[in-house]
Amino acid sequence: MAEAGSAAAAPDIDPDFEPQSRPRSCTWPLPRPELPEAGGAAGAAEEGAGGAAAAAAGPGRAEGARAGGAAARKGGSRRNAWGNQSYAELISQAIESAPEKRLTLAQIYEWMVRSVPYFKDKGDSNSSAGWKNSIRHNLSLHSKFIKVHNEATGKSSWWMLNPEGGKSGKAPRRRAASMDNSSKLAKVRGKASKKKPPLQSAPESTADSPGSQFPKWPGSPSSRSNEDSDVWNTFRPRTSSNASTISARLSPILTEQDDLHEEELLPSLVYSSASSNVPPTVTEELELIDGLNLMSPSTSVLSTQQSASSGQIQRDSSFSLRSPSAAGQTTTFGNSLFNPVDISLQSSVSHFSAPQTLEALLTPSSPPPRDVMMTQVDPVLPQTGSRMSSRTLLLLGGQAAQSKMSSGNPRGKPTEQQAEPVSANVLPSTLPIVTSPQNTASITSLKAPVSATTAQSVQLGSPLLLSSASPAPLGLNQDRLPIDLDIDMYMENLECDMDYIINSELMDGEGLDFNFEPMLSTPSYPSTSQASNHTWVPS
DNA sequence: GACCCTAAACAAG
DNA sequence: CTTGTTTAGGGTC
């Protein structure tokens, strides 16, 4: 019956966008999933209220699905004006009905209005206040709902069902006093190590509920620290559980900034890179990738395929990256991803590395680089900055620079980053320039594969390089390789890898289904983790 | 007491 | 204003 509406309801979100690129596998974040228009939805329901019996019918449809329903139904009389279902249940249905299993508050309201006869008339006016309040209340109160920060939309967060099942139980009162790092670690781990470890999960998780069913959701309840956590702010599990990881995967958003910390915490995630200079870079890249994933789930891989709208996509990703408060660093890296192509440019830049040059560089070339640029620059952290710079060099111009060094520095100031703080600044600043949106876009478009894979490229890079020379300190390898070669290397490798990757991705497919779904696609987990090392990377 | 619903105060953005 | 979080009061089972 009317319920169908609900089914229909789901789609509302879809229409989001994607004019250009084929919806196909889009995995990345939808910039604005939220669609204001709701237009699609609009028609949807029309059920005409047939459901007078709001009661049953209304929400009913799902009843089958939700076991809980049974319980609710007890006497047969409806407990609420709309039926036996509680707000929590309705919300759950709403979310489930969504293709991506996530909705914003507004969308939930919408769903209610469309799908539940009782609310149909109450949707608009002020009358809504009451039930909407209740909805919000339920969302925040129950652990079964988790909130995922949604930057893309710019609006409200995504609400999802807590895989762990947070029962209807209320969420434990959070606000633990000071959390520990454990939380951080957990999170970090999730992200960094995320690889796929099904659930590493929480160290001491309270056992919220193992709910291990969802491998994808690491769910590490353990601790969340709220207050403190700016870190968490991005997405915070309401009560106690939900892990950050989750958010990362589920929603494109997430926004991490802790990279630094993470790094420290997690010495060498994937590769044992710890040893040489380069390696760290790699690590970072990974993280970066993750970051990207946040935004665009499988960006690296899939995006390539999608290539079509790469331009936008890229941007979006950048956006997301920067947005987060701390993001600066992240951002930088993010760019780095795209940079590989630019290497030559950067290398040149590196030469200049004079402070003056810096400005000069900025001035002339700087087209209005969007926010991104700004952001990147801003975050320059003193300490961090230095680190960054060094790394950055490595990543970006790194090869070039080093190669030069090895060859014999043209000048006295080969890679003085360390020596000169300024240089450090320079780099970051430079990056933006190079990366400027347009450039990026163009680059991207031109070599979609490259850009897309860039992240991987890094990873690949190391291995490849190694392969060329045999396992040895990365640094050496790079030294050897002339810039050009490097690039070529990238290119070729990329191609091969891409296929490989794609295949592997498909093969693994854990969550691919989602990705390939029609419109939106959920971001998802897989990309990051899998892509990172599993398949294609020779271990 | 567990669950729910409703209201409302507050804080943020 | 919207979104979220919390508290509090009442009801029902």
Image (cartoon, coloured by chain):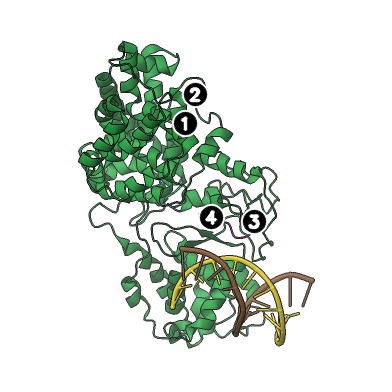
Chain colours: A green, B brown, C yellow
Q: Is residue A397 left or right of residue A202?
A: left
The chain that hosts pointer 2 is A
Q: Please, what is the three-letter code of the amino acid marked with disc 2?
A: Ser
Residue A351 in the image: state x and y as whole percent. 28, 24
Circle number at residue A233: 4
Same subunit, tags 1 and 3: yes
Residue type marked 1: Thr
Q: Mark 4 and mark 3: span between their CA atoms?
A: 13 Å
The amino acid type of the residue labelled 3 equals Ser
Residue A299 got which mark?
A: none
Q: Determine if marks 3 and 2 fall on one subunit.
A: yes
Residue at the spot 41% in from the left edge and 67% down from the top edge: A10
Which of the two labelled residues, at mark 4 and mark 2, occupies the earlier sequence position?
4
Give the CA separation, mark 2 to mark 1. 7 Å
Q: Earlier in the sequence, mark 4 or mark 1?
A: 4
First along the sequence among labels 3 and 2:
3
Q: Residues within 10 Å of mark 3 (few under 14, many from 20)?
A: many
Where A348 sits versus C4, above or below?
A: above
Majority secondary structure of the magenta segment?
loop
**Whether marks 4 and 1 lie on the same chain:** yes
Kindly check if marks 2 and 1 are in contact, taking CB atoms under 8 A apart as contact: yes
Judging by the rendered image, the residue that carries numbered circle 3 is A240
* Label 4 element class: helix
Crowding at dot 1, Cα within 10 Å, few <14 / some 14-19 / many 20+, comes out as many
On residue A273, the disc is 2
Image location (x, y in percent) of residue A191: 52, 41
Residue A527 in view, yes or no: no
- Give the residue number, with chain letter if any, for mark 1: A283
Q: Is residue A308 visible?
A: yes
Q: Identify the mark nearer the N-term, 1 or 3.
A: 3
Given residues A253 and A366, the one toward you in this image is A366
